[in-house]
Image (cartoon, rainbow, N blue to C red):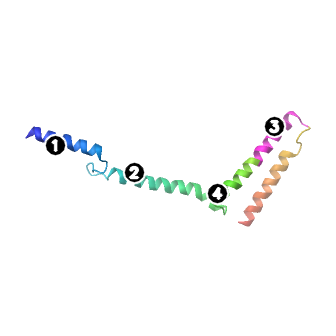
Amino acid sequence: MLAQRSEQGKLANASRAANPMILLSNQRPFRAHLAMQNRSLLTAVNRAFAEHPASVGESYGEHFVVAGSFGWALFKASLACFVHAVLPFAFEKTGSRAITELHTRMVMKRNQH
């Protein structure tokens, strides 16, 4: 009798390991638990990626293009500023002109929204 119970316990443990849908004590099935975690994670990720672009009247893709163009313009201006630091006669107004143009673009966009 004792050997039979021990054998049944081993089978039950092996079955639990092979099938995550088997309930362990009073817990939810493992897959359902993961699905619930994934949904809340996806909701948080979606909110993180959509909240700010929506606040400025853009989709994620539109915001990607606009922010990327700002980044590219600032990158080019920063290179000009580094060259200007070494060669003061080169790119005398490039950095300040880029900042002014970007500020104007941002303010105009803000006023449209």
Q: Where is residue 13 in the image (x, y as percent from the top left)?
A: 23, 42
Lower sequence index among marks 3 and 4:
4
Callouts 3 and 4 close, C-beta under 8 Å: no
Circle 3 is placed at which residue position?
82
Q: Give the residue type at disc 4.
A: Gly
Q: Which of the 4 image quarters holds residue 8?
A: top left
Q: Point out the tag, 3 or 1, that comes first from the N-terminus.
A: 1
Q: Is mark 1 on a helix, strand or loop?
A: helix
Predominant secondary structure, magenta span: helix
Mark 3 vs 2: CB contact within 8 A: no
Of labels 1 and 4, earlier in sequence is: 1
Which is closer to the viewer, label 3 or label 2?
Answer: 2
* Mark 2 or mark 4, earlier in chain: 2
In the rendered view of the protein, which quadrant contains the C terminus? bottom right
Q: Are marks 2 and 4 in contact (CB under 8 Å)?
A: no
Q: Are marks 1 and 2 in contact (CB under 8 Å)?
A: no
Q: Which amino acid does label 2 sit on?
A: Leu
**Mark 1 and mark 2: Cα distance apart in space:** 28 Å
Could you tell me how far apart the alpha carbons at marks 3 and 4 are, in whole angstroms? Answer: 31 Å
Residue in view at x 74 percent, y 62 percent: 109
Classed neighbour count for the residue bearing mark 2: other residues with Cα under 10 Å, few (<14), some (14–19), many (≥20): few
Q: Quadrant of the N terminus?
A: top left
Residue at the disc numbered 2? 34
Q: Which x, y percent locates residue 98?
A: 82, 49
Residue identified by numbered label 1: 8
Boundaries of the magenta span: 73-88
Question: What amino acid type should be assigned to the residue bearing mark 3?
Answer: Phe
Disc 2 versus disc 4: distance between alpha carbons? 29 Å
Image coordinates of residue 73 in percent, x first then y, are 77, 48
The residue shown at (71%, 55%) is: 66
> How far apart, in angstroms, are the residues tagged by discs 1 and 4?
57 Å
Q: Which of marks 1 and 2 is nearer the N terminus?
A: 1
